Amino acid sequence: MPYIAVVGSGPSGVYTAQSLVKEARVPDVRVDVLDRLPCPYGLVRYGVAPDHEKIKSLQGTLRTVLQDERVRFLGGVEVGPALPPAKLLELYDAVVYCVGAAADRRLGVPGEDLPGSCSATDFVAWYSAHPDARDDGFVRGVRTAVAIGVGNVAVDVVRILARGAAELTPTDMPQAALGALAESEVRDVYMVGRRGPSQARFTTKELRELGGLADAEVVVEEAELALDPGYRDPAALPAAVRRNVEVLRGWAGAPRRGAARRIHLRFFLRPAEIIEGGDGRAAAVRFERTGPDGLGGVTGTGAYEEIAAELVLRSVGYRGVPLDGLPFDAARGTVPQAAGRVLRGGTVSPGEYVAGWIKRGPTGVIGTNRPCAKETVASLTSDLAALTGPERVTGDPLAGLIAAGVEPVEWTGWQSIERAEAALGRSLGRNSVKIADWEGLLSAARHTGDM
Ligand SMILES: Cc1cc2nc3c(=O)[nH]c(=O)nc-3n(C[C@H](O)[C@H](O)[C@H](O)COP(=O)(O)OP(=O)(O)OC[C@H]3O[C@@H](n4cnc5c(N)ncnc54)[C@H](O)[C@@H]3O)c2cc1C
C-alpha cells in the first residue's frame, strides 16, 4: 500500500489528500498530512478574517477529508533541519509539499522597521491567534492607522481596525486581541494604493463590505479617483473592475453621516518613507503622489504628501520561504516544478511534489488550490508505479517519524484543542475562542482524557 506524506494542512494540503483518496488508481493509498502547527487548515484558520464566518466554515469541508479513514493528521511535525526532506523520502513513497507562502513582501523604504510599522501578516497572525505571533501592542495609543496596499488582505486589516467590539465579540478572535481592539481609540484608517482604483486588486464583495460597518464610514476623494482614466470612463473595464468603480462612485456621491470611525481610501500615492516621531516610533508616512503613465502603470510626480499614522501595516503581497533540503526559486519565491513535480537542477526529483502557494505563488482564492492540487496528484499517481518498488516499502511511516524524535499531535489531540477552545469561549461568555500560545495548544492537545 502506498504511503504518501502531504506537508502542510492548509487548503492545498487537504485538497491534495482529497484528490489522493478519490483516485481510483490507488484505492489502498494512505495519506499522512503533516503540519508544524498542532492545528489544521493553514490560512483558513490563521489568515481568513475572523468576521468572515462563511469562509471560515470551509473548515468543516476540510475536516471531512482529514477524518477519512485513509487520511491521518499529524500536527506539531515540522519539516526542516530535524526532519529533512531526505528523511521523509525514506519513510514515504512520495511527499507533496504544500507549505504555503508565509513571508511578506517589503516596501523597501526608510523607516520600515520602526516600532509601529509592521506587516499586515504580523497583525493578522495576532488577531488570528497564530502561536508564533508577537503581541506588539498594535493598536495601543493609535488614533490613525495606514494600510499600504489595496488587495483583499489590506481590506481585511482595515475592516478589523474599523469594526466595533459588538461586531468582533461573536468571532473566535483571541481574548487579548479582542480586548485591545474593543478599547482601541483608532478613529481614522487609511488604505493607500500607488495606482488607481481600476488597478486595485480587492474584489467587489470585500470592498462593498467596508460601507456596511456599524461604526465606520468610507471617505473617498472624487478628484483623486478621477485621475484614473478607468474611473472616468469605465466602459472598457472588465466587469469585476467596473463593479469596484461603481462602488467607489457611490461613496464619492454619498453624504457623510458622521460615524465614529472613518475609512479613507486613497490612490496614486507611493510610499517614500515611514517618518519617526519624537518617541522613536512611526508617526507618519510620506508618500510621493503618482499619476497614470499612459501605459497602464504610474509614474512619480515629485509632489509629496504626509499622512499621520501611529500604526503602519504593509500589505503588498506574500512570498514563499525556502525549506532546507528543497530547491527554491528565489526570484519567484516558489519551488521549481513542472505539473507539480519538483525539479532539482531542472530535472524531475522522483517522489517529490508541490501544490498550492509554494507551487504557483500567492495568488487566487481558496478554491484555486483545488485544481492546483488535482494537477499535482495526477502527476503523482501516474508516477506511482515507478516510485513504489519493494525496496521503498518500510511499513507504517509513523514509527519512523517517532524514531526520528517527532511527537505528533494526532486527530484526537486536535479534537481536544477544539473542546478546550469551546470551553474557553463558554468561560468568557463567548462562542469558541482560539488559544493563542504554543503551551496552551500543546497542553490542550495532550488532555485527551474526557473524550
Ligand atoms: C491574510 C489572508 C487572508 C485570506 N483570506 C482569504 C479569504 O477570505 N478567501 C479566500 O478565498 N482566500 C483567502 N486567502 C488566500 C488563502 O488563504 C490561500 O489561497 C490558501 O490558504 C493557500 O493554501 P496553501 O495550502 O498553499 O497554504 P497555507 O494555507 O498557508 O497552508 C500551509 C500550511 O503549511 C504548514 N507548514 C509550513 N511550513 C511547514 C513545514 N516546514 N513543516 C510542516 N508544515 C509546514 C503551515 O503551518 C500551514 O498550515 C487569504 C490569505 C491570507 C494571507
Image (cartoon, helix red, strand yellow):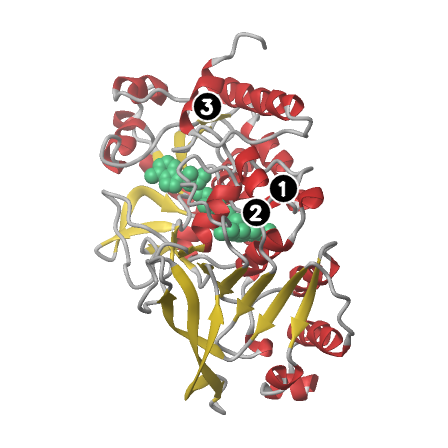
* Mark 2 CB lies closer than 8 A to ligand 1: yes
- Mark 1, secondary structure of its residue: helix
Q: Position of residue 254 (x, y in %)?
A: 77, 74
In the foreground, 169 or 335: 169
Q: Find residue 56 and name its label.
A: 1
3D distance between C-alphas at marks 1 and 2 = 7 Å
The answer to whether 5 appears left or right of 291 in the picture is left
Q: Position of residue 301 (x, y in %)?
A: 43, 89
For the image shown, how many numbered marks are present on the structure? 3
CB atoms of marks 1 and 2 within 8 Å: yes
Residue labelled with disc 2: 48
Residue labelled with disc 3: 440
**Sooner in the amino-acid sequence: mark 1 or mark 2:** 2
Amino acid type for the residue under numbered disc 2: Val
- Mark 2, secondary structure of its residue: loop
Which residue corresponds to the image point at 52% horizontal and 18% vertical from the top-left?
412
3D distance between C-alphas at marks 2 and 3 = 22 Å
The answer to whether 145 appears left or right of 399 in the picture is right
Is residue 85 in view? Answer: yes
In the foreground, 388 or 135: 135
In the foreground, 290 or 14: 290
